[in-house]
Image (cartoon, rainbow, N blue to C red):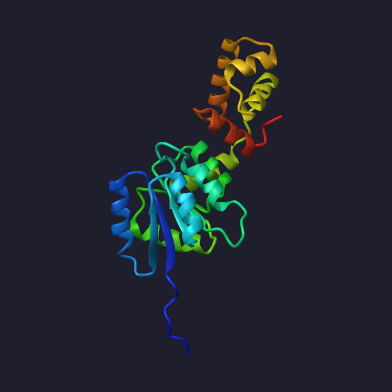
Amino acid sequence: MNDRAPRPVRLLVCDDHVVVRAGLLALLGSAPDIEVVGEAGTGEEAVALAAKLTPDVVLMDLQLGEGIDGVEATRRITSPAPGAPPHVLVLTTYDTDADITRAIEAGATGYLLKAERPEELFSAIHAASQGRTTLSPPVASRVMARMRAPRPTLTDRERDILGQLSRGLANRDIARALFISEATVKTHLGRIYDKLGVDTRAGAVAVAKEQRLLP
């Protein structure tokens, strides 16, 4: 009979707020089956430490101040590499459709809100270490609602602008490419944002990719 205790989940914590990070470390220190092996305050630092420390899970905030954000850090951490990359569990205060979509597309295994109870966080970390998805109830509801909702109807011109947007072009460059005024581009962008339920260019592209709206 094997009485050896299971190996604790090795965790890397990334949050740019020192006080929040300290609170998380204190909380996680109370979980005997979770071992915090490192902490990062920037996306770049998280990517470097993930490669160096090879944790099982990276607990990732989305907004990280200067430098790359949590979505880009997640994409780099989970990108194919020698060995099995760690799983990324997002822990954030942001629950917009665009944030959720971008994080999941980048490779996040789970998405939790910071309002969750400690027990839920511990459970999600263990689930993530096994590659299982955990979503906060409000996040799961948004995902399900989006899946059930009919796809938004975009005009041909709006699709054209979305296509240019996905290439990273600025409004002036989009106007030149489509032979329209910059003011017309801004008007169409406003309508696109309303239809997709987003308020940023990155959010519009992320939702458009998810719903296969790009030309």
Q: Residue extending furthest bottom? A: 1
The x and y percentages for residue 145 are 54, 41
Q: How many marks?
A: 0
**In the visual, does 209 lie left or right of 110?**
right
Picture quarter containing residue 180? Answer: top right
Indicate whether 125 appears above or below 2: above
Q: Nearer the viewer, residue 194 or 84?
A: 84
Q: Residue at x 49, y 59 (%)?
A: 128
**In the visual, does 42 lie left or right of 195?**
left
The x and y percentages for residue 154 are 65, 24
**In the visual, does 81 lie left or right of 12?**
right
The answer to whether residue 68 is seen in the rendering is yes
Indicate whether 29 appears above or below 186: below
Q: Nearer the viewer, residue 12 or 127?
A: 12
Picture quarter containing residue 122? Answer: bottom left
Q: Residue at x 63, y 36 (%)?
A: 209
The answer to whether residue 111 is seen in the rendering is no
Q: Residue at x 47, y 43 (%)?
A: 70
Indicate whether 17 appears above or below 133: above
Q: Quadrant of the C terminus?
A: top right
Q: Nearer the viewer, residue 69 or 147?
A: 69
Q: Residue at x 44, y 42 (%)?
A: 62
The x and y percentages for residue 68 are 48, 39
The x and y percentages for residue 24 are 32, 54
Q: Nearer the viewer, residue 100 or 52?
A: 52
